[in-house]
Image (spheres, grey):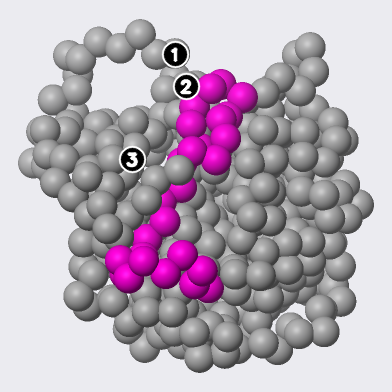
Amino acid sequence: MYFKFVVLAAFCCIATSAEFTSYEGHKVYDIKPENTVHQELLARLAQNDVYDFFTLPRVLGLSARVLVQPEQQAEFEQTLQAAQLPYEVVNENFGETVAEERMQNNFFRNLRSSSRSSISFSAYQRYDAINSYLDQLAENYPSRVNLKTIGKSYGGLALRTITITNGDGNTNKKVILLDAGIHAREWIAPAGALYVIQQLVENFEENSHLLETYDWVILPVVNPDGYEYTHTNTRMWRKTRKPASKSCVGTDANRNFDFHWGEVGASSSACSDTYKGASAFSEPETQALRDLMHSLTGRAKFYLTLHSYGNYLLYPWGYTSALPDTWEDIDEVAQAGAAAIKSGTGTDYTVGSSTNVLYAAAGGSDDYAFAAAGIPISITMELPAAGNGFNPAPSKIEELVRETWLGIKAMAEKVEQKY
């Protein structure tokens, strides 16, 4: 209680010019379908853009979670009750949660703003702080760290990769490619990528075996325009920020890749959170990631993209319930990650193909990396929410990125054994 008072007091007098979107009165529902009829109802509801489904698993026994605005709540609850679909309100006022998260995050971020020696995991870092950290690593470890700008966002922000090596000068090693932040609001994903970077660079002695035959190429923020917008304006913004129509902005970058683009699980409506874009690779951010993938074809053996939330390790296909011929190879790697996390922390991860575990969604980066860029192991990792309505509270970041690293490290070790 004392801590909460201090945080609130610290920010009650700080003026800001930002116009934050209010989520006052929005509720978060946890819904557990008991049969296929329930699942089909939820799938139909998810097609309505007024409901913001955070997760919608297809596996019975796993809960869906959805954010509903005040004016829609009565009808939404009546629909669930009529279908005898069990639900629980897990957050009565999402607006309060967002406001508290913002205050706590700013409080802890400001406490560490004077330090550039390492990154802090007590707060979600802004784009500039992430870049400052990368710059400091390049300065401190010039033989093992190389930075590159692979493109720019629609808003002109640099898309920067960090290549991490063991400094032996071999420029033709195999590669693990990792990215995060395709969806703007998933703050824990860039935090997870930053922890991987820290472990490989600053904790090199303990993790040097991961760099003997592989280099790591990491793009910690794929969608910096959207990421910044969630910090300054609309917390639950998901898309890019390029205008999509006269009245709507942004494309779901993870529906914008040119592999079965637009076939299923993506919207043609420019205002939808899952808008596929006017064309495949309509966004400069997805173009840059595509080009990065192809530049590593032949060398890249493992593509890992970090998202949130839900404790899932997912692999192709996202456009169909069918599985690729080599699915068992990918599953073996994903299962190694899940087992390491379970052993280390007790957290359970669900493993399987995207369509069969969650939902069909064509145009994703993982399908494209596997099918078009020829990367044999391609996995989407959905990080936990730690019981919160969406992202983990700032106080939970370090605990979760440590847990995530257990899984990523185990998957990398399995890939090194196989390729």
What's the residue at 19%, 23% (across, down)? Answer: 11
Of 72 and 388, which appears nearest the observer? 388
Q: Are marks 2 and 1 in contact (CB under 8 Å)?
A: yes
Percent of width and height locating residue 328:
70, 89
Of 96 and 382, which appears nearest the observer? 382
What's the residue at 64%, 55% (across, down)? Answer: 295
What's the residue at 27%, 58% (across, down)? Answer: 143
- Callout 1: helix, strand or loop? loop
Report, in whole angstroms, how far the alpha carbon at label 2 lies from the one at label 1: 6 Å
Residue type pointed to by label 1: Glu
Left or right: 154, with 85 as reference point = left
**Disc 3 target residue:** 130
Magenta region: which residues? 149-174
**Disc 2 target residue:** 233
Residue 174 tag number: none
Percent of width and height locating residue 108:
18, 39
Callout 2 environment at 10 Å: few (<14), some (14 to 19), or many (20+)?
Answer: some
Residue 220 drawn above or below residue 287: below
**Disc 1 target residue:** 19
